Image (spheres, rainbow, N blue to C red):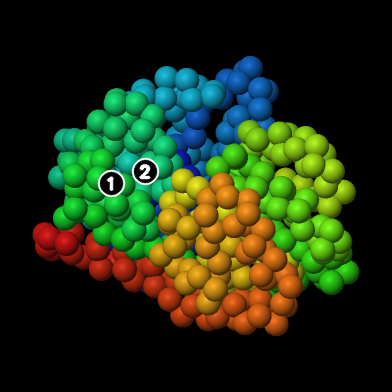
Amino acid sequence: MRVLVISFLYPSRKNEVLGIFVHQQAKALREAGIELKVISPVPFTPFPFSKIAKKWGEYANTPREDVIDGIEVRYPRFVSFPKGLFYERQGYLMFRGLKASLEKAISTEKYDIIHVHRAFPDGYATMLGIKNHRIPMVVTLHGMNMTSTIYRSSSCKKSIAKVFDKASVVVTNSNKQRSIAVKELGYQRKIVVIPNGVNEQEIGKQSIGESASNVGRVVLSVSHLLPQKGIGENLIALSKLLPKYPDLLYVIIGEGSAGEHFKRFAKQLGVERDVLFLGRRSHKEVLQYMANCEIFSMPSWNEAFGVVYLEAMACGKPVIGGKGEGIEDVIEHKKDGLLVAPRNVDSLVSALDYLLEDQERAQKIGDAARKKALSSYTWNMNAERYIEVYRSVLAGQRL
């Protein structure tokens, strides 16, 4: 079976963590016998765009073609604008940049299925590109599509609905995403829930130069630095817990638009010496820090799923996530993780204190988390379920 993967969310030599979960899935599919290639559209960044921000400079220096872990990736350019300007036009603009690469792939390389990640703009662009071809399209929703983009404007919502109409199957990675799609768009029969996974070969083999015991009791977060990720709530909780646990250290990995705000907020709370902002790190380094932290805490809201929760669980760590969010599909409260009310600092403080005051109890929760992640949520299992979807689509079966 030959599958063409289309995703803006995909790693490159200039950003090795962007869409790492899509790459992990692609590797697992290939290991399961699927022949695949990837087309990953990249914003066109002429001067001075390439100088206005780090990410735009990375776009400018991304190669046109590459091979990552044995997977061939093409990076065609499309017109995009900073700060989400003209976002409603992103689907069409991506299509214009994607058109030639997509046409060549379909006409000369004879793929059986197109698997596109994100309904908008990627799915919309692909839908326009295959309108003259009879090739099935499977769409996987990620993060912002069902928690933000669908509410951005009526135009975005209509564009997503058109993609749902065209898709043979829509895959969500959590029941939260599925429920939003059903509520907002009225779809049910086309939607399949397949959770993300972890790479069991990478988990548990990491170490960093200095163990957690030498630097304090480490609470870790890994995310884009955005308000909805719960970083601010973690900082407030830290300030409340430090009198009881003076050796507490909060480590934050990631970068984003709210990064400077969080640094100022930490200083305002008087905890700047107890917080370590590490910026963006490689996936390998992230796993190293997960292996050495005591607790993973990301009490976010508007969270579709969050692979980092699973990765921390697979490292044997008790995790704290948001009640009612996508990760609720995985975590059983106080058995293999803790769920807290989003934007509720008191709930978060209680959860952190529950884990910090009894390390043996916390370790039992971490052990249960590791067992669940490695027995039920791996990329190999994810790939098997996707292959079932591909086969059903090609057989014309209704899911």
Judged from the image, the secondary structure of the residue bearing numbered disc 1 is helix
- Numbered circle sitting on residue 146: 2
Proximity of marks 1 and 2: CB atoms separated by less than 8 Å: yes
Q: Nearer the viewer, residue 327 or 127?
A: 327
**Quarter of the image that includes the C terminus:** bottom left
State the image quarter where residue 355 is shown.
Answer: bottom right
At horizontal 50% and vertical 22% (from top left) the residue drawn is 81
Q: Residue at x 60, y 21 (%)?
A: 49
Camera-side residue of 58 and 320: 320
Left or right placement of residue 170 versus residue 74 in this view = left
> Which amino acid type corresponds to the residue marked 2 in the rendered image?
Met
Q: Quick check: 52 above or below 273?
A: above
The numbered mark at residue 168 is none
Q: Residues within 10 Å of mark 2 (few under 14, many from 20)?
A: many
Residue plotted at (50% across, 30% down): 43
Q: How many marks?
A: 2
Residue underneath mark 1: 181
* Neighbours of disc 1 within 10 Å: few (<14), some (14-19), many (20+): many
Mark 2 falls on what kind of element? Answer: helix
Determine the residue positioned at 54% across, 73% down. 334
Q: Is residue 71 visible?
A: no
Residue 220 rendering spot, x and y as whole percentages: 70, 59
Do we see residue 328 in this rendering? Answer: yes
